[in-house]
Amino acid sequence: MSPTDAQRAAPLLEIESLRYRYGQRLAVDGATFAIARGELFGLLGPNGAGKSTTLRCIAGLIEPDAGSMRFAGAPFTPATSGADRARIGAVPQEIALYGELTARENLDFFGELHGLSGAPLAAAIDAGLALAGLADRANDRVKSFSGGMKRRLNLAVGNLHAPELLLLDEPTAGVDPQSRNHLFESLLALRAAGRTLLYTTHYMEEAQRLCDRIAIIDAGKLLAIGTASELAAQAGLPGADLEAVFLRLTGRSLRDA
Ligand SMILES: Nc1ncnc2c1ncn2[C@@H]1O[C@H](COP(=O)(O)OP(=O)(O)O)[C@@H](O)[C@H]1O
Ligand SMILES: [Mg+2]
């Protein structure tokens, strides 16, 4: 049965009043937002805003102190449910690969960790190499790769088990422009294939260029959500870019934040 329009429009992930505290420090302070199926959703904010903490809660690496999450309409508790965690793919901010292993061996290793084997694993590895643009480097050790190539392979690892939601935490940090464009093409290809992506960045031009909708986060609070032009209108600055929107919302420049 193909999904109805209503099912397609229904949120894949709903986050309600999410709160997380590291000791005394409130890192996420009551975040509420929803990501639609097939959407490339951006979380935009300066360093320390709470982006990675929000993603860690969704990936189940940490358990929220308060708030609730729903996935495909049902309660979602990834910190305590392996089945819930399996619905998420996470591309961490740091490169998480084995330098002594080849690209193919890395994909094989992480694929087995996700419970893949046999023909489905082989197909997932080939798809991952294609997504990363590394089919011709499959048998080279990762330690010989450029930073951009490692980033692309990091993405392929996170996407290996075809998760319903793919989380990307600042995947372009320290990436050269050519690899960055390649990464963008990969993300847009995933979205075109109907996948749902949550992308964090502190680069407003990336969010503006790439994301269907954007949530602006600062000091743990979500300040506004919408398309880039909706955000500008909400801020009373129709037609303005996200830098001006951020300045209006926070009184600070995102570049200086
Ligand atoms: N492991 C940690 N222990 C203590 N404080 C942390 C830890 N990780 C992050 N923080 C703090 O929580 C806040 C949000 O951090 P983070 O979610 O990493 O923000 P972002 O990813 O937007 O840069 C910051 O003030 C940061 O210093
Ligand atoms: Mg971060």
Image: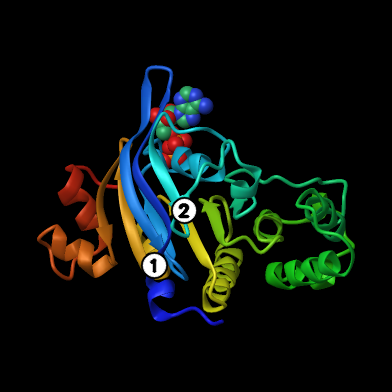
**Number of marks drawn:** 2
Q: Is residue 4 above or below residue 214?
A: below
In the picture, residue 4 is in which quadrant? bottom left
Disc 2 crowd, CA 10 A, few/some/many (<14, 14-19, 20+)? few
Horizontal side of 192 relative to 235 (left or right) equals right
- Mark 2, secondary structure of its residue: strand
Location of ligand 1 given as a quarter of the image: top left
Q: Is residue 111 above or below residue 134?
A: above
Residue at position x 70%, y 55% in the image: 150
Tell whether circle 2 marks a residue whose Cβ is less than 8 angstroms from ligand 1. Answer: no
Q: CA distance from mark 2 to mark 1?
A: 12 Å
Colour logic: rainbow
Residue at position x 85%, y 61% in the image: 104
Horizontal side of 34 relative to 171 (left or right) equals left
Name the amino acid, label 2.
Ala
In the picture, residue 135 is in which quadrant? bottom right
Horizontal side of 142 relative to 26 (left or right) equals right
Name the residue nearer the viewer: 130 or 142: 130
Q: Is residue 253 visible?
A: yes
Determine which residue is flagged by label 2.
Answer: 74
Q: Residue 75: x and y, percent?
A: 46, 47
Residue at position x 62%, y 43% in the image: 94
Name the amino acid, label 1.
Ala
Residue at position x 40%, y 41% in the image: 68
Quadrant into which the N terminus falls: bottom right
Q: Residue 147: x and y, percent?
A: 67, 53
Disc 1 crowd, CA 10 A, few/some/many (<14, 14-19, 20+)? some
Quadrant into which the C terminus falls: top left
Determine which residue is flagged by label 1.
Answer: 10
Q: Residue 46: x and y, percent?
A: 36, 43
Q: Residue 182: x and y, percent?
A: 60, 70
